[in-house]
Amino acid sequence: MADKPNYFDPLTLSKLSTLLLRARYVVEGLISGLHTSPYKGFSVEFSEHRQYTPGDEIRHIDWKAYGKFDRYYIKEYEEETNLRCYLLVDASASMDYRSNGVSKFDYACYLGAALAYVMLNQQDLVGLVTFADGIRQQLPPRSSSGHLRAVIESLEQTVPTGETNLGRTLHHIASQLKRRGLVIVLSDLLDEPAEVMQGLRHLRYQKHEVLVFHVLDGDEIAFPFTQLTQFEDLEADVRVVTDPRAIMADYQEQIQQFIKDYETQCRRQAIDYTLFDTRTPLDKGLLKYLAWRGA
Amino acid sequence: MGWFTFINPAFLWGALAASIPVIIHLINRRRARVVRFPAVQFILRAERRVARKYRVKQWLLLALRTIILFLLTTALAEPVLRPSEGDLAEITQTRAVALILDNTMSMAYQVAGTTTWELAKEAAGLVLQELRPQDQGVVLPVVSTDEPPQALSGERARLIQQVAALDGTSESSGFIKPFQQAYALLKTSDASKKEIVVVTDRTRIPWVGFEPAALQIIDPQVQVTVMVVGEQNAPSNAAVRVARFDHAPVVAGVRTKLTASVVNFGALDRKQVPMRLLVDERTLDQRLLDLPRGAAAEVVFDVVFDQPGYRRGAVVLGGDALPADDAFYFTVPVRKALRVLLIDGDPRTTLVASETFYLMNALNPEGTSRPGPIQPRVVPVEEAERLRLDDYDVVALANVLTLSSSFRSRLMAFVNRGGGLWWFLGHHVDPNVYNRDFFDAPTRLLPARLGARLDRTERHPVPLHVSETDHPLFKPFSGQGREALGSVRVQRLLTTERASLPPVSRVLIALPDGRPLLLEGKVGRGRILMFTSTADVDWNELPVTTTYLPLIQTGAIYLAGGDTDQRLASDVRIPHPITLKVSEPQRDLPLTIRDPHGREVRVFPDGPEGGAEAHYGEARVPGFYRLRVGQETGLVAVNTPLEESDVTPIQPEELREKFPGIPLAIVQWQPGDPVRPPQVTPMSLAGWFLIGMLALMLVEGVLANRLR
């Protein structure tokens, strides 16, 4: 029997025609895997009754219904939300690197679209900011069903180009966002770490919850080059000819330190940091979000 | 060249390969792939920190690889510690080797199923394998038809192939010619070291007559090495030397003896050696024979041929280590009958009283009713003059007064061509007339000048004295038959003048007083006998003794065999050519010769009128050669050279004496032995170079692994 396609695999998703379709596959696939609806919870608006089954919490038993019918019923509620989520997607030239057919930017788009899909289905408000050395496009947070299409179209039309200035952009966004909400940063963070952290701290200062989805290509982490290579920077006019085998160890040490520094700094600032390799299945990002949402 | 030198300096060109790592490095630098990469900042930082150290390692690696390749190629050039000047010359000098390969018949000697020839080829191949690219060599088989011999060649593979393609021969030859060729060829070479290598067995024969003076060219600078291969112990070989019939011609129905002479050339006694006589490939007789070492023996076979014609036979000895000479092939023309013309000089009305009565009965005891193998015909002189003498083998003249001049001429021609003539004297014979017509004539048909008639007074028989007991005429009287040739009463005879006895004449039977009773002469190819008394009982009593019949029959057969041996050479030895005399009517016809292998060759007779001969020089295989001229056919038996059967070994001291002043090495070679005497072996550095290379490869491996 042929294997079913894994729609969490970024490479598999890249073969689907539209970003909307890709987002739907990711989310629906995840939901079917969880077997429970992420859209149902124990919020304030009553949704329906169902019979008690062993394992249900006793506190959710409707004692009034028990008085009337002499049976245990569990009250279920329609989840109520007023979450504002800002998706900050890095569209600088460095995000255009790909080693396996899916660029970091593609990956960020898949993840962002999937998140938007989930959020909008939960009636959360979703906003989008694409940036490079500054904000390139901005969609204000909305929860309408047509907003998903606007988010996705915006992502699809964006071409990663230009230098990164993540720190300044985060400061700018932090000063723009009046109401607090959830800020999800999808970026390779290839900027001056101190400035980036300053920007993130600014967001935290504004009482935003911040999730950092650090997207890196596998090559950037493993540096698997073996022959003499001339490396050219994607953003700046910098070239270097080197034997990768000579510097591999040092490079790997640096990149691990780079990741670790972000991880440590984010933890200190109560920022949820997650590293994504472009080969990482996309459900990891969604689960991360859902875990956060559940908490 | 410093402290060391190279045996194969040509390989030093390979040292250029040491530049390969540098070239690869430069090519790789040019071919650096371009990658557009986001995290160049980390690369730059890493470059700054580790690249210098890495580059040093890279250069070190490059240097190591270059040195490794240099050491490898240098090791191939076989570096050696620079030896002394003499040793250096030994190593670097070029060699010219003339390989003399003994392919004579004795090389067919077998030990444990392997012939000496096979061992010799193996040894020769190894000698040639020793040749280096700068050396030269030439292969000179002892028996060779190549004229002139090949030149020195540097193509080792071709020389080895040439040896592999060589076949052993059944011929005999000495070493003088190949040595002359070898010295002549080496003289033309500019090689710094010249050698003659002789691969041979231990037999003395090829060295017989080998003297430095016979070589004409000698170069004392040429090293001679004699590689002795094959039998190390005392060799064993017996051969049939020859087989001969006791009389010729051989006549169908007449018992004849074939005597085979066998020689044991070996150093061991041989007992119960089987011997077979084959005629037309059928075994007629076989014997067992004891042969002491170095001894010869004779075996006599009694043979009666029932059919006339050319018959082929062989005397075959039981197998030994050299089977090539175990058979002696012969051919024999078997006559249907002998025709004897008896010319009666004193015919009478009754047979008993006739001069030829006893002769007639002695030659054909069965009478005319039952013709025997000897068919006599009695005619008077007048009738004889009208007959063709060529229709007879023997003409006997009994008490003939005289012959006409024309008949005398015909009789002379008849004898010259090989016909037999037997004189019987009597009262009609006038010595003066006989001496004039037959002794003083240009063709001397009388074996001796006749003298006066002698009347003997003895009343009793006197013993007959036989001067040559081994004469074919007396074969019947050998052994116990000697008694038969006893005493005879001779009352009268014609004396002969002993002083006038020609050199070709001899007395066969004499009376006690020395007077000849039977003489033999020879004219041309013919034989002549003269009985100085009568053929009947008028002057002697021999016709009524037991001696008469065998003597007369043997005499007739002997006289008829005058030209038998001449018609075909019955004992042809390899490589002597076959020569066949051709009659005038056949001189324009080709002679077709078919050898024992079935190959046919055509030759055309050549020579003056009346003396045309056909020569065939290719009889190199023992066996029967069939000859055909027009409608006539014949057979020639060819045998191996007898001297090659002598496997007596030559001693090293004897061999050294043949090379005075010439550097000589005698090597006893066996399979598995090296082919050259111990040489100067310079200390090779190739091994050390390779060890160094391996050590550097180890370092290179570790270093390269660390760089990964």
Image: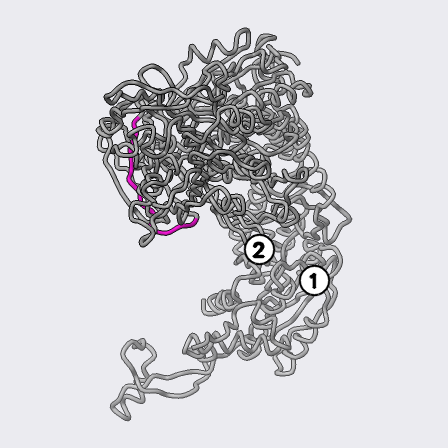
Check the image and tell me how it is coloured: one colour
The kind of residue tagged 2 is: Gly
The image position of residue B614, as x and y in percent, is 60, 41
Please name the predominant secondary structure of the magenta segment in the image: strand
Q: At x 50% / y 19%, what residue is drawn?
A: B503
- What is the C-alpha distance between the residues marked 2 and 1? 19 Å
If you read the primary sequence from the N terminus, does the residue marked by circle 2 or circle 1 appear first?
1
B705 relative to B335 in the view: left or right: right
Depth check, mark 2 against mark 1: the one in front is 2
What residue does disc 2 label? A218
Q: Position of residue A184 (x, y in %)?
A: 59, 64
Nearer to me, A254 or B675: B675
Quadrant containing the N terminus of chain A is bottom left
Point out the image quarter for the C terminus of chain A: bottom left
Check disc 2: other Cα within 10 Å, few if <14, some if 14-19, many if 20+. some
Tag 2, which secondary structure? helix
B504 lies above or below B408? above
**How many callouts does the rendering have?**
2
| Most foreground residue, B255 or A157 | B255
Q: Amino acid at mark 1?
A: Ala
User: Residue, x 62% and y 77% (percent of image)?
Assistant: A20
B185 relative to B297 in the view: left or right? right
Which stretch appears magenta?
Answer: B297-309
Q: Is residue B666 magenta?
A: no
B302 within the magenta span:
yes
Residue B199 is situated, as x and y percent measured from the top left of the image, at 48, 25
Q: Which picture quadrant has residue A56?
A: bottom left
Q: At x 67% / y 40%, what residue is drawn?
A: B609
- The answer to whether B462 is drawn above or below residue A207 in the figure is above
Q: Secondary structure at mark 1?
A: loop
Q: Which mark is drawn over residue A91?
A: 1
